[in-house]
Amino acid sequence: SLPVYVRIQGATSPSFHIDIVAHSVGPTVVVSAAAIDWGKTPVLQHVHRPLVLTNHSLIPAEFSGQMRKAASPFALSTPLGTLEPGETRELSLSVHLEETTKVADDLILQIKDAPEQVLSLAATGTGSTIWSERALDTLDFG
């Protein structure tokens, strides 16, 4: 609380004492989805999905994003940035799978002076994990 004293010029009574209490609110950033599931995804390829952030406040919103797991197959194209008031920005989330299993992780979006937002990410690898630099159409064992 902040004490404020108001004195009226020429008054004989003592000044008024007022306590001002304020609650501040940081920026309001809306995320396009709470979860993104790539579904069946080809292995050994980068597959992208859009993620849209919108700043619905009158102040800039500084954000940072990181995956919960250190060795995550998921990646965020722009992990740091600032959204100006009213700005909408599309970011790119990608996944690169090396196995034909289901993987999951969380994207943690931290917005300065606002609660963090957690998005669930999931994908299931499909296809062959065998890869060769040379075409295997014809093999010559000589």
Image (cartoon, rainbow, N blue to C red):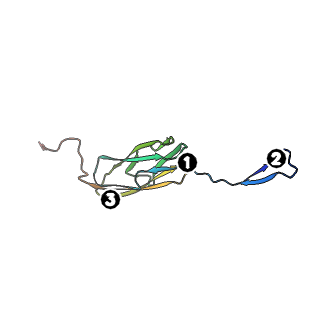
> In this rendering, which labeled residue sits more in front, label 3 or label 1?
1
Tell me which numbered mark, 3 or 1, is placed earlier along the sequence: 3
User: From mark 1 to mark 2, how far is it between C-alphas?
Assistant: 41 Å
User: From mark 3 to mark 2, how far is it between C-alphas?
Assistant: 72 Å
Query: In the image as oriented, which residue stretches furthest toward the right?
Result: 12
Q: Residue 73 at what x, y percent from top left?
A: 37, 51
Q: Choose top left, top right, bottom left or bottom right for residue 142.
A: top left
Q: Name the residue under label 3.
A: 102
Q: Choose top left, top right, bottom left or bottom right for residue 17.
A: bottom right
Q: Residue 89 at what x, y percent from top left?
A: 43, 42
* Mark 2, secondary structure of its residue: loop
* Mark 3, secondary structure of its residue: strand
Position of residue 108 relative to residue 80, above or below, is below
Residue at x-position 55% and y-position 52%:
114
Residue at x-position 45% and y-position 46%:
54
Three-letter code for the amino acid on which mark 3 is drawn: Lys
State how many labels appear: 3
Q: Residue 16 at what x, y percent from top left?
A: 80, 53
> In this rendering, which labeled residue sits more in front, label 1 or label 2?
2
Q: Name the residue under label 2.
A: 8
138 lies left or right of 31: left
Position of residue 107 relative to residue 133, above or below, is below
